[in-house]
Image (cartoon, rainbow, N blue to C red):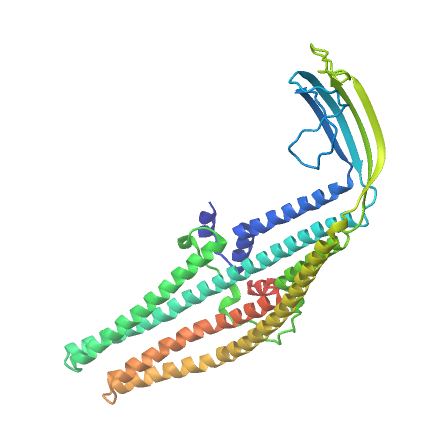
Amino acid sequence: MAGCALGQQPLTLEDAVGRALKNYPSIRVSQEQINAAGAGIQLARTAYLPKVDAIATVDRATRNNVFGMSLPQSTLPSISGPVIGSNNFGSVWGSGIGVLVSWEPFDFGLRSANVAVADAAKVQSEAALKRAQFEVAVKAADSYLTLVAADEAIKAAQAGVDRAAALLKIITAQVSAQLRPGADQSRAEAELAAAKTQVIQAQQASDMARATLAQFAGGEPGQLTMSPGRLLQLPMTGEVAAANTATNPLAQEQAAAVEQAQAQLRVLERSYFPKFYLQGAAYARGTGAEVNGARLGGLNGLAPTTQNYGVGFTMTFPVADLPGLRAKEAAQGATIRAQKARSEQLAVELRAQWNRAVANLNGARRIAENLPVQVSAARTAVSQATARYQAGLGNFSEVAEAERLLTQAEIDESLAKLSVWRGLLAVATAAGDIQPFVAETVTK
């Protein structure tokens, strides 16, 4: 359906950019990353909520118990109750049910720091989306300009074929009338074949550019029809305003990466503090064993019969974690410095890119202004060489050379306007905003 729509409606540069921003997969990938970051913020905020653990258990086990300490481990099951001096495999039912509520009333800013990290991650994801949208828009615009340039080159090259064919027709008639040597006809045929080859090469470039544009705009390459708008005219002249490269999406994404790294450091700085918990527990247990070791038998112990509850305030402190935290802070500090250095490097690169783009644009404008003179002179040279040849004062090589120069000059002229537009796109790319460029290409 998308391809059919493209075939019916000529595609402007604005349309191509809009379709790319809507359909290109990398945009959707970045959007889902933002959604994931938003969920991460909600996850970080759940740390403010109380923690509630509930348990229910039923078991059939022996009730032998011994004095002594066991170091913390996760293998040996624990057992409560007095030592009854027995050691046998008689088992009883046991059951338990309970709930534990823990809440951290204050944390010296650790939870808010974790939320800030999640917020920074979302900001970076949003910056990454803008950067992805910007890059896709630039590639779509560039591929559109490339296709328009290729199509214009085909027209100019075809004009060269038409001239070579007309000249061959004249020379063939003169050779048949024995007014010219057969070598001139062979040379004219070779020039016509070379001109056709140039058209084929231009068509090949057009097909490749069309496939690239279809990659971004969607649809089938063969169904793309173009509506260049003002791209076949020279854009309005004027001084290029100085750009603030700090607003470039690449720079903004890097600034977000710096902020995220700093937020992660703030989490580490708030990690070496005591943790205070307000806790409350209620539970009940049942057992089929008596204190003297006797077993009650039957279903005794399957239902909890003894209840307890308690409330309290506990504190934990990771005393030995300080060296590890200091090492992590040092590593994170190095990461922050590296990210800041990348920001500075990117700023230098963007400024250099903008300077090169402005220089290229100025050169493209001067070339576009000079090419009409070159084309006019080439046409005059073709007329003079043809007249000399027909008067017997020149040879066919002079005519063929003049024809080639004219074809190349016409191709260069057809591409010169688009070179200026491409220069404007490069300047807008370095500045970080191509929307004014896109708007200028629309027919007014």
As rendered, which of 181 and 324 lies closer to the eye? 324
The extreme top residue here reads: 298
Res. 330 visible in picture: yes
Q: Say if 400 sits above or below 97 in the image.
A: below
Q: Residue at horizontal 65%, vertical 71%?
A: 243
As rendered, which of 21 and 278 lies closer to the eye? 278
Number of marks:
0
The extreme bottom residue here reads: 393
Q: Position of residue 418 (x, y in %)?
A: 49, 70
Res. 263 visible in picture: no
Q: Is residue 74 left or right of residue 50?
A: left
Q: Is residue 365 left or right of residue 197?
A: right
* Quadrant of the drawing holding the C terminus: bottom right
Q: Residue at horizontal 68%, vertical 62%?
A: 336
Q: Residue at horizontal 85%, vertical 35%?
A: 312
Instruction: Give the quadrant of residue 334.
Output: bottom right
Q: Position of residue 439 (x, y in %)?
A: 59, 62
Q: Position of residue 96 (x, y in %)?
A: 73, 22
As rendered, which of 179 and 18 lies closer to the eye? 18
Q: Position of residue 192 (x, y in %)?
A: 27, 72
As rendered, which of 444 and 49 lies closer to the eye? 49
Q: Residue at horizontal 74%, vertical 43%?
A: 45
